[in-house]
Image (spheres, rainbow, N blue to C red):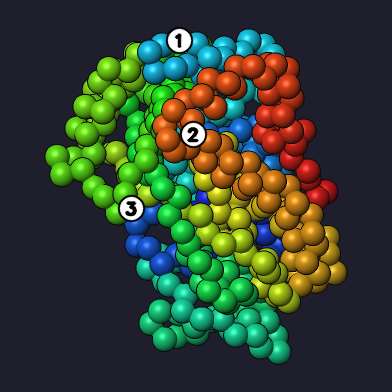
Amino acid sequence: MAQSVLVVGAGITGLATAVALQRQGFEVRVLEARDDTSAGTGISIWPNALAALDELGLGDAVRSAGGRVTAGAVRWHDGAWLRRPQSERFIRALGEPLVVIRRADLTDILSGPLPPGTVEYGVGVRALAMTADGVRVTLSDGSTRDAAAVVGADGVDSVVSRHLNGPLARSYAGYTAWRGVAKHRIDPDMAGETMAAGREVGHVPMGSEHTYWFATERAPEGRTSPGGELAYLQRAFASWAEPIPALLAAADPAEVLRNDLYDRAPARCWARGPVVIAGDAAHPMRPHLGQGGCQGLEDAAVLGALAGRAPDLPTAFAQFTTLRRRRVQMIVRESQLIGRIVNLRPAVLSAAATRASVLVPESVLTRHLASIAARSAFTSAR
């Protein structure tokens, strides 16, 4: 009889982990506290994550459903180029283009291999307890479930992570982020970021007709824009070089998301016995390297491979921690550092640091990016 595993959380990491474990013969159920997980805009899937998806048999489906990006340009807000890498060098360093896809489409692809009923929505987890045979999970309605093991993929405020680590403090990073999709086509060579002192806007093609964009700026915690988030952004970035004003003019206000950004204390313990955490539950990170979801996909592929070959799941979970922790912690630290530089105070320091980045040779930056996001950067457990 197949061992049963409960995955807590039906986000990107949770669904990918369920697929990975199912492929290894485990009986998997996914519990999701939310009734609706459809919210989201776009997401960049870098070649390291595509390599992980290939191990799950889903890489080509993601490539087909998204737009392929072959540039990573950086400009100042007046349109002056700070960095304009050659697309051939970019692709050669990474192994292939990155893919930008709607989160809803990625979720559909990840859910596709799972049997109907695998994911249970509106089912929250309140507590976990070890038993002689594995783990007993207490649900939000007071009922319990037993399983051989539990994987916590339940995000930054993870119940499973708190079970392993106790309280995990969060602190506001000092700035907020908006995300959206515009029905507006940009030149593929413009894919990248436009910068100013204390502000940035990212923009990448998502297929032939749409562009995924994000923006960040310093703001008090918890603030909202009284006239609507999109209207605020259209005013705030009206003087910036195109395509920023055009993108914001073509965005749907109902699809614009705003989220304050936080740093959370690192999870000291990723696994204990038959319980393990992955994705944001283990290693939340700021968005500046585009690796949050990508590292969750790497986690899923590695966790599944180890579970399939280890003598038992506790051993696989301990091996997972050893294999993944060093790489992920480096990316967490670098994402945080970039965010701090972009948001230095006074703003003149942020501007000076951003402009100084042009002094770093292109070959050095490309080589470093490849160490994070190239296909070869993903270390398979097979």
Mark 2 Cα within 10 Å, few/some/many (few <14, many 20+)? many
Locate residue 88, reporting x and y percent. 67, 11
Per the rendering, the mark at residue 80 is 1
Image quadrant in which you'd find residue 253: top left
Residue 25's tag is: none
- Which of the two labelled residues, at mark 1 and mark 3, occupies the earlier sequence position? 1
Question: Observer-nearest residue: 274 or 155?
Answer: 155
Element class at badge 1:
loop
Q: Residue at x 41, y 71 (%)?
A: 123
Three-letter code, disc 2: Val
Q: Position of residue 61 (x, y in %)?
A: 57, 34
Query: Circle 1: is it few (<14), some (14-19), or many (20+) Cα within 10 Å?
Result: few
User: Residue 16: where, in percent of width, then height?
Assistant: 59, 51
Residue placed furthest toward the left:
227
* Disc 1 and disc 3 in contact, CB within 8 angstroms: no
Q: What element carries label 3?
A: loop
Q: What residue did someone put label 2 on? A: 342
How far is mark 2 from mark 3, CA to CA?
17 Å
Taking the view exactly as shown, the residue that stands out farthest to the bottom is: 132
Residue shown at 74% from the left, 61% from the top: 321
Mark 3 highlights which residue? 221
For the N terminus, the image quarter is bottom right
Residue 2 visible somewhere in the drawing: no
